[in-house]
Image (cartoon, rainbow, N blue to C red):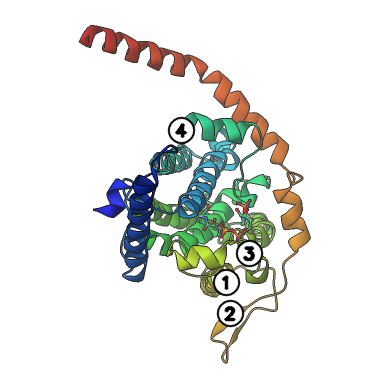
Amino acid sequence: MAMQNVQSVPAELSPEALESAAQLVAEAQADFDRVMAEDSRVEPRDWMPEAYRKTLLRQISQHAHSEIIGMQPEANWISRAPSLKRKAILMAKVQDEAGHGLYLYSAAETLGQTRDKMMADLIAGKARYSSIFNYPALTWADMGAIGWLVDGAAICNQVPLCRASYGPYGRAMVRVCKEESFHQRQGFEILLELANGTPEQKAMAQDAVDRWYAPSLMMFGPPDDDSPNSKQSMAWNIKRFSNDELRSRFVGMMVEQVKVLGLTLPDDQIRFNEDAKKWEHSPLDWNEFQEVLAGRGPCNAQRLERRRQAHDDGAWVREAASAYAAKQKEQAA
Ligand code: FAQ
């Protein structure tokens, strides 16, 4: 079938061969358009427009990097968790995030990029990862706020991605979302316990919510008018909702859940607009967002440096794995 056979056209071809190659590409494009119109799935060996492949690679690799860098704020608290039980839970959660990174790197690799190259770009500071992970985790209550708000925003953003048109991405998201749901509940439970503890513990929980709230809303990306990629990604059934739509939905969820916690969100302008049928909130500081994206957030340098160090520390594992693979190959020959 055209969609599976046409990947590229060799440079030196006769005019007839060129014409028939052009015909094949046109058929493959028509197949791709039909898949989009039917809201069906594209698989790795199917033909796809180069711009579609690049967009997916951009989003999936950024997503993978976010999971891996996102381990750091919580990993910093594993050794300071207040009990053995909390330590075990937090360790499992951080390991889950590593797993999410690995599924996502695997999905990105099906688009023709090596994991080594993606990692090299991250370490060189050339790749993006989510803005949220450039903020510091200052107290134990931040473990609650990260789980509740950051994983909460991640779920809100990622549930629609389970229906992304690219098969490996959508399937990875199904498992990721199931695990993120546990993460959110563990964060909520940490906050609930603190909110019902001593006045100092309650104040610590409120302070953490106050600091993580606005950055978690920025996870959804710039406002729709400043989001250059949304329109095309939605036309390709990668994104299903715009950045502002998902942000508004998230605010509506949090405004109810915070009542159960007995805490407040640091925004007294939240209201449901009956006409527009959406939740509204105070404007966010998009200059701060741009500063973080430009590498000037509170922890950007520290996060990248830690990742570089971890990569260097892991060199012996990669060398051992390569030596083992070479030995296996030699024995099989
Ligand atoms: N941070 O045109 P748009 C997690 C960039 S995972 C940094 O709107 P798009 C789990 C964007 O890349 C969190 N950069 O872009 C966890 C683009 O730059 P480019 C990660 C951002 O792609 C929890 C430019 O701005 N989740 O938290 C951000 O259509 C706890 C223009 O923006 C995902 O990656 C940002 N917040 O929409 C782990 C979900 N927002 O590439 C550990 C998948 C935008 O043109 C602990 N990704 N940019 O140079 C997506 O849904 C989308 O890519 C968006 C951005 C919504 C993030």
Kindly report the distance in space between the C-alpha atoms of the residues bearing marks 2 and 3: 20 Å
> Ligand 1: does it lie within 8 Å of the C-beta at label 3?
yes
Task: State the residue position of label 4.
Answer: 114
Is residue 5 found left or right of 148 in the rendered image? left
Kindly report the distance in space between the C-alpha atoms of the residues bearing marks 2 and 1: 7 Å
Q: Residues within 10 Å of mark 2 (few under 14, many from 20)?
A: some
In the rendered structure, which disc, 2 or 3, sits on the residue that comes first in sequence?
A: 3
Would you say the residues marked 2 and 1 are in contact, meaning their CB atoms lie under 8 Å apart?
yes
Q: Residues within 10 Å of mark 1 (few under 14, many from 20)?
A: many
**Residue 62 pos. (x, y %):** 54, 46
Task: State the residue position of label 1.
Answer: 251
> Mark number for residue 227?
3
**Residue 75 pos. (x, y %):** 55, 37
Identified by mark 2, the residue type is: Trp
- Residue that appears at 48% across and 14% down: 316
Name the secondary structure under disc 2. strand
> Mark number for residue 279?
2
Identified by mark 3, the residue type is: Ser
Kindly report the distance in space between the C-alpha atoms of the residues bearing marks 3 and 1: 20 Å
Q: Ligand 1 lies in which image quarter?
A: bottom right
> Ligand 1: does it lie within 8 Å of the C-beta at label 1?
no
Would you say the residues marked 3 and 1 are in contact, meaning their CB atoms lie under 8 Å apart?
no
Is 42 rendered above or below residue 102?
Answer: below
Kindly report the distance in space between the C-alpha atoms of the residues bearing marks 4 and 1: 37 Å
Is residue 76 found left or right of 11 in the rendered image? right
Kindly report the distance in space between the C-alpha atoms of the residues bearing marks 2 and 4: 41 Å
Is residue 286 found left or right of 141 in the rendered image? right
Q: Residues within 10 Å of mark 4 (few under 14, many from 20)?
A: some
